[in-house]
Image: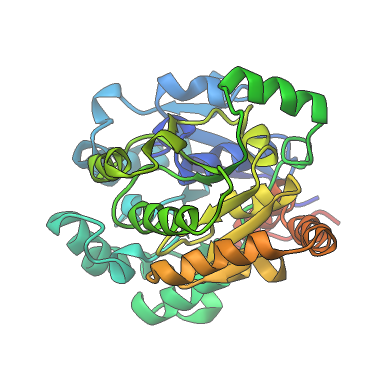
């Protein structure tokens, strides 16, 4: 039998599991906890313990609550964590975000990088965060022993912008919980619609309210043009928690002639997400850049058509199932919506079936197994005979 390796996975930046990185860490950790080839430990805030129910005190390293802010969190990872790594005898450190890469961990380090947004969207971040992402992060990443990318698109960006050797980067796609994201029962949908007062057909965009990167304003403009040219009373649901620039989106909604039909329900609990998707006419996903784009796969798995930006990783994630548009073209987005509603019943069913088949390629269990194998490859530990 091969040795069991002791891994520390940092959950110090998961934002209570509400962010994409948060979903990634929670999904992987709770699956890898049961693996007998690794001994997985979590470094996280005690406030997040409920997200990791199978991790006892012996497998939990508490990050002080005082280190929640960005700068203090970075300093904890750079100054305090290296000493704890030696003290507890960890074999490998897994950092799931480029902003927390440890400069001198003293043990092998693997990082997951989800996107290269500071290079692609220079107005997404402030001056200091932008400089950190473009100047310091590549240097830190080149000090890591191994890198995981969540898409082939991000891998290409890491080679281009970070100057990382291609062979150092392993692509491990994000996954799906198949028992959660699947077509829903008609009666459950009726109950859900009644609960939320969803009396009209609706299009949905699931993303935090972030401007300009998530491209809400252009979507609202395209929706208005589409409504101007159709007699159908179709609502637009913009689901997600307020983030940087949310006030710009909220004002644009308030100024819209169709303001009463644009809904802002806020953060959507994961327990209800499949119902939000399945009840929609389609998911519209206009984001300017995504390292992966989980909502696209989730919606397809729920048997819902997808109209998506053709930018970044989204064509990779949506495959041949989605209808694509240029996210910087309002007219292109409007045309994609018109194409959506021009499809026949047969074409709709074919697109839904393609989506279900494509979504079946993504699975968190597979992602967890591949990540575990990456740990062992990084340490050059053989698998059990």
Q: Position of residue 26 (x, y in %)?
A: 56, 36
Q: Position of residue 24 (x, y in %)?
A: 55, 45
In the picture provided, is 51 more to the left or to the right than 132? right
In the picture provided, is 382 more to the left or to the right than 173? right
Q: Position of residue 129 (x, y in %)?
A: 20, 55
Residue 244 visible to the viewer: no
The colour mode here is: rainbow
Camera-side residue: 316 or 41? 316
Camera-side residue: 246 or 143? 246
Residue under the point 76% across and 48% down = 303
- Picture mark count: 0
Residue under the point 68% across and 69% down = 319
Is residue 301 depicted above or below 16 in this figure? below
Q: Work out which residue is located at the far left of the displayed protein and give it.
A: 127
In the picture provided, is 167 more to the left or to the right than 74? right
Is residue 376 depicted above or below 182 in this figure? below
Residue 4 visible to the viewer: yes
Residue under the point 35% across and 54% down = 101
Q: Position of residue 138 (x, y in %)?
A: 31, 69
Is residue 284 depicted above or below 191 in this figure? below
Residue under the point 50% across and 59% down = 229
Which of the 4 image quarters holds residue 213? bottom left
Camera-side residue: 134 or 55? 134
Dividing the image into 4 quarters, which one contains the C terminus?
bottom right
Is residue 190 depicted above or below 150 in this figure? above
């Amino acid at each position: 039998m091969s040795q069991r390796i002791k891994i520390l996975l940092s959950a110090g930046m998961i934002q209570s599991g509400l962010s994409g990185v948060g979903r990634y860490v929670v999904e992987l950790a709770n699956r890898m906890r049961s693996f007998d080839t690794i001994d997985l430990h979590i470094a996280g805030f005690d406030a997040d313990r409920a997200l990791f129910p199978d991790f006892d005190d012996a497998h939990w390293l508490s990050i002080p609550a005082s280190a929640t802010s960005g700068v203090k969190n970075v300093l904890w990872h750079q100054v305090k964590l290296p000493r704890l790594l030696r003290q507890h005898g960890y074999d490998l450190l897994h950092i799931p975000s480029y902003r927390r890469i440890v400069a001198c961990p003293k043990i092998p380090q693997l990082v997951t990088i989800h996107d290269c947004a500071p290079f692609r969207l220079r107005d997404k971040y402030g001056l200091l965060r932008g400089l950190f992402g473009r100047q310091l992060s590549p240097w830190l990443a080149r000090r890591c022993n191994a890198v995981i990318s969540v898409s082939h698109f991000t891998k290409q960006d890491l080679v281009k912008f970070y100057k990382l050797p291609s062979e150092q980067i392993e692509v491990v796609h994000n996954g799906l919980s198949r028992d959660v994201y699947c077509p829903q029962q008609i009666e459950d949908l009726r109950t859900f619609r009644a609960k939320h007062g969803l009396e009209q057909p609706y299009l949905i965009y699931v993303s935090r309210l972030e401007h300009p990167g998530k491209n809400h304003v252009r979507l609202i403009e395209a929706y208005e043009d589409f409504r101007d040219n159709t007699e159908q009373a179709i609502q637009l649901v913009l689901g997600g928690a307020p983030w940087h620039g949310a006030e710009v989106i909220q004002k644009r909604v308030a100024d819209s002639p169709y303001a009463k039909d644009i809904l802002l329900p806020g953060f959507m609990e994961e327990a209800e997400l499949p119902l939000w998707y399945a009840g929609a006419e389609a998911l519209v996903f206009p984001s300017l850049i995504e390292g992966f784009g989980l909502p696209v796969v989730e919606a397809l798995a729920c048997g819902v058509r997808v109209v998506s930006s053709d930018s970044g990783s989204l064509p990779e994630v949506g495959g041949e199932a989605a209808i694509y548009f240029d996210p910087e073209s309002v007219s292109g987005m409007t045309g994609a919506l018109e194409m959506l509603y021009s499809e026949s019943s047969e074409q709709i069913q074919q697109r839904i079936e393609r989506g279900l088949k494509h979504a079946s390629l993504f699975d968190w269990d597979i992602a967890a197994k591949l990540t575990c194998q990456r740990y062992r490859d990084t340490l050059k530990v053989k698998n059990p005979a």
